[in-house]
């Protein structure tokens, strides 16, 4: 089981790690090539870009879950039909999102909390990022489907290739070509186009079960994969809500200096978040397949292995940031005030990611056993219910350090509430018994 776990989870985690690295390098180039204000502007847009990632993940996990379940129960024709419906629906949706985001970019960044000084930069970044909504969303979904179709290494290779392309183009667009913040957005989009170009041959050849083809959209099927995948969307939206609330708190507390510090923290912690997300998404095909095959013991074992792996990864990351954090932060900014705030915030926020890893794993697990309502409860507790309360109380008591600590408190309380109110073993067995 360990071998099978690492066959799927490791390539996914590595791919997400490299993907997060190009996000960090993007931040370095923006910070050094455009300035601290540009960093803050990108951070303002980040909740929106995370939401888009969440939409793609919703379709990827919801559709991928149904595909793997049907493959596990030897219903390959239905698996193929579901894949085609997910792809077609997401394509239509991504076109609509792209048009809306381009037209209303200034209004969107104002809603996200951009100050008058940041609106021009933030809206420019969003507008050019939105030009590539189609490859951004489609690339994430196809990557997941390739994994569910038994080729996790190809999914990893496509992500790595897109990341390398993004890094190279980031440098070219921001420095030699002096395209500024829009250059960073364009580089990201072109990187995703490379990812898609590598994935497409899988779906037009006979190397797997899933192949492109026209299909009529069915309301019930769409409703089913959205229902199962919605917690993944909610999880990403929850993360963007977390950033949104913390942005507001920091603007009120310390203005653009605190916001720039938080932007640097977000760039660095993107590493650990994406690795944890990659871990949970990587194990999803195994969970869904064994759910379809009605093997509860294997599902629970994979869940346990994922939780332990997430904990070990977090401990290593916390240690690295504590020792090398100042050096890492100095890459983004030369402002000593911003750097000092960011170092303290980074080490306090990192503790929260231990609980984030546990909560992400649980969210994906309950999706795999067709209990999306429980996954949604995790997301509601994390972001909408407990975080604002924690932010309000702790910022009053501890100032800016209270803002950093609030994420850990909200994640910890979420874990405790759900862990001790729901018996995961009995829910798994009951879900399998009730499955068709």
Image: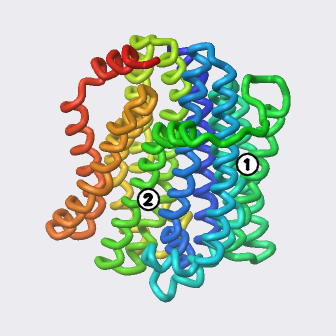
Residue drawn where x is 72% and y is 52% of the image: 192
Q: Of 230 and 387, which appears nearest the observer? A: 230
Q: How is the image coloured?
A: rainbow
Q: Position of residue 168 (x, y in %)?
A: 76, 57
Asked whether disc 2 touches disc 1, contact meaning CB atoms under 8 Å apart, the reply is: no
Say which quarter of the image contains residue 9. top right
How crowded pointer 1 is (Cα within 10 Å; few <14, some 14-19, many 20+) is rated as many
User: SS for tag 2?
Assistant: helix
Horizontal side, residue 363 vs residue 110: left or right: left
User: Horizontal and vertical percent for residue 377?
Assistant: 30, 43
Q: Residues within 10 Å of mark 2 (few under 14, many from 20)?
A: many
Instruction: Determine whether 41 is above or below 414 in the image.
Output: below
Q: Is residue 81 visible?
A: yes
x and y percentages locating residue 187 in the rendered image: 73, 62
Relative placement, left or right, of 147 versus 300 is: right
Q: Earlier in the sequence, mark 2 or mark 1?
A: 1
- In the rendered image, residue 189, in percent from the top left (x then y), is placed at 72, 59
Residue 118 lies left or right of residue 166; in this view the side is left
Q: Residue at x 14, y 67 (%)?
A: 397
**Closer to the observer: label 2 or label 1?**
2
- Report the residue at 80% width, 74% height from top: 177
| Labelled disc at residue 162 | 1
Marking on residue 240: 2
Is any atom of residue 310 visible in this view?
no
133 left or right, relative to 271: right
Relative to the observer, which residue lies in front, 396 or 97? 97
Mark 1 element type: helix
- Kindly identify the residue that appears in the image at 80 percent across and 39 percent down: 200
> Which mark, residue 11?
none
Total numbered badges shown on the rendered structure: 2
């Amino acid at each position: 089981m360990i071998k099978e776990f690492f066959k799927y989870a490791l390539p996914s985690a590595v791919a997400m790690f490299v993907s997060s690295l190009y996000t960090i390098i993007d931040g370095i180039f923006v910070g050094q090539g455009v300035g601290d204000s540009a960093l803050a502007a990108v951070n303002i847009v980040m909740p929106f870009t995370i939401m888009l990632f969440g939409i793609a993940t919703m379709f990827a996990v919801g559709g991928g879950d149904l595909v793997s379940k049907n493959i596990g129960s030897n219903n390959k024709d239905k698996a193929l039909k579901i894949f085609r419906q997910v792809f077609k629906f997401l394509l239509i949706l991504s076109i609509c999102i792209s048009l809306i985001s381009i037209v209303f970019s200034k209004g969107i960044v104002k809603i996200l909390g951009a100050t008058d000084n940041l609106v021009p930069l933030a809206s420019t970044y969003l507008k050019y990022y939105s030009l590539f909504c189609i490859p951004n969303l489609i690339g994430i979904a196809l990557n997941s489907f390739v994994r569910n179709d038994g080729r996790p290494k190809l999914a990893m290779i496509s992500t790595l290739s897109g990341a390398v392309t993004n890094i190279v183009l980031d440098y070219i667009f921001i420095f030699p070509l002096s395209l500024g913040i829009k250059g960073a957005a364009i580089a990201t989009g072109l990187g995703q186009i490379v990812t898609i170009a590598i994935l497409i041959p899988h779906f037009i050849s006979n190397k797997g079960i899933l192949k492109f083809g026209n299909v009529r959209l069915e309301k019930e099927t769409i409703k089913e994969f959205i229902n199962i995948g919605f917690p993944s969307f909610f999880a990403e939206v929850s993360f963007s809500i977390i950033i949104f609330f913390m942005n507001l708190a920091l603007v009120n507390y310390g203005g653009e200096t605190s916001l720039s510090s938080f932007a640097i923290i977000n760039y660095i912690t993107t590493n650990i978040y994406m690795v944890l997300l990659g871990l949970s998404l990587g194990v999803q095909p195994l969970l869904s397949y064994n759910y379809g095959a009605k093997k509860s013991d294997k599902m629970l074992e994979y869940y346990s292995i994922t939780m332990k792996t997430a904990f070990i990864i977090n401990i290593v990351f916390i240690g690295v940031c504590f020792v090398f954090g100042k050096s890492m932060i100095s890459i983004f900014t030369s402002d000593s005030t911003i750097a000092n705030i960011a170092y303290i915030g980074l080490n306090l926020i990192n503790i929260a990611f231990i609980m984030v890893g546990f909560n992400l794993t649980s969210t994906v697990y309950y999706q795999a056993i067709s209990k999306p309502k429980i996954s949604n409860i995790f997301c509601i507790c994390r972001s909408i219910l407990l975080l604002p309360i924690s932010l309000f109380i702790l910022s009053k008591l501890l100032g800016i350090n209270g803002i950093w600590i609030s994420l850990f408190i909200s994640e910890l309380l979420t874990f405790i509430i759900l862990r001790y109110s729901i018996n995961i073993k009995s829910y798994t067995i009951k879900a399998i018994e009730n499955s068709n």
